[in-house]
Amino acid sequence: MSMVALIMTVALTQNVVLVHYLGIYQLSAVVRSPRRALAMSVATTVALVWVGLIHWVMYRFVLVPLNVTVLSTISLTVVLAVTLVLVLRIGSFLFPFYRRQLRQGAPAALVNVTVFVITMALVEEVPSLVHVVSGALAAGVGLGLALVPIAAVRTELRHRRIPWVLQGDVSVYLAAAMMALAIQQIDGLLHQFFIPLY
Amino acid sequence: MTHFSRHMTTRNPVWMIPLALPFVLYAGQAYDLALLFSVTVAITVPTIHGISFFVERWLPRHLRAISVLVIGAVVVTIVEMVLVRMDQAPSDRTRYMVQALAVAGITVWPTFSSPAGESFRHRMAVAGGLAVGFVVGFVPLAAIRIALSRSGYHYADSVAVGFLLLAVGRMLISTYRRYGSAATPHGNTPQDTAPRGDHP
């Protein structure tokens, strides 16, 4: 798969939120404001690239030569857990006044289905490290492309008079449904050019 | 209300605190996927927390996450190996989703939010409530989507329709909570539950 095809596939036609819904757990909390959604997207992108790098090295140089690829879940989870502890320790030391935000944000950005599934798929399906990093970056961009507009819609709706039954999570789900429908149409158009990654 | 029943109802991981949305939207497409994820979540989540609780006692509080993640990965790997042994090897996408149970919100959230000095009974009540709440919340959604898909509406498999059904479900729950509980002696009146600004 070429680099352009990989980036288009991961960022758009297999968008992590709107096509596969691998989104962050507390979607409604993440999309409370566009700024928060952007921050979470950037944090998740950094996590995707870092975890992708480490897991690719582990997978190609340890698991495959020893023929124990069945342990890849454990390997990736250990990478995630150690990274989480390091981020919390180093972050608390460097930014002591942001300790509470770090304790809330780091697990959400790092230990989630998006980071896990994208990393697993890229490392197993894509041969080179450059492609893994590019794919991780593209997935992060795709996450931002989905989360920031949903957050913008939610922020806009908060200042409008809408029926009480549509307030809160319902407006988030409806915004996500409409964007997923739009992405689905784009996906249909691009599907003949780009082969699905997984 | 006990912790178990609270996590099944007011903190349901599908409808109220959506910790399991990735699995709900993916697995609600076909009967076999729905069955696979219902059984897997019901088995793995309480098992992971049952084992992890005792390991966590030997670790400092900030390392609890490592315990639940590693034990989660081991349990999920065993489940995966059992599936392969039973000649039920899942497709790549399903396999990734089964593996992702190790790091899913429904699995790790009870650890991140557990109070200091938590008892084993409390942890198992939370984990069990989440697991049963997942199945209880997931089955109706999957049944509707699969029925729609079987009736010829192929878009029912899409994420858009999944979100739409979730939105409709939340509307029904909100309506029930606002008006349905008003008749009970201790229930909130519509005025109590109205958003700020709607009061006369």
Image: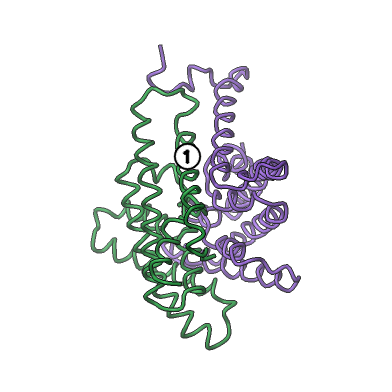
Chain colours: A green, B purple
- In the picture, the quarter occupied by the N terminus of chain B is top right
Judging by the rendered image, the residue that carries numbered circle 1 is: A178
Q: Position of residue A148 (x, y in %)?
A: 35, 46
Q: Position of residue A25 (x, y in %)?
A: 48, 50
Q: Can you see residue A84?
A: no
Q: Position of residue B154 (x, y in %)?
A: 64, 45
The answer to which image quadrant residue B90 occupies is bottom right
Kindly identify the residue that appears in the image at 47 percent across and 59 percent down. A114
The answer to which image quadrant residue A47 occupies is bottom left
Q: B4 and A106: which one is in front?
A: A106
Q: Chain of mark 1?
A: A
Circle 1 Cα neighbour tier, 10 Å, few/some/many (<14 / 14–19 / ≥20): some
| Outermost residue to the top | B200
Q: Position of residue A179 (x, y in %)?
A: 45, 43
A76 lies left or right of A136: right
B38 lies left or right of B61: right
Q: Can you see residue A23?
A: yes
Kindly identify the residue that appears in the image at 73 percent across and 67 percent down. B88
Kindly identify the residue that appears in the image at 34 percent across and 39 percent down. A152
> In what element is the residue under mark 1?
helix
Q: B172 and B183: which one is in front?
A: B172
Kindly identify the residue that appears in the image at 40 percent across and 42 percent down. A150
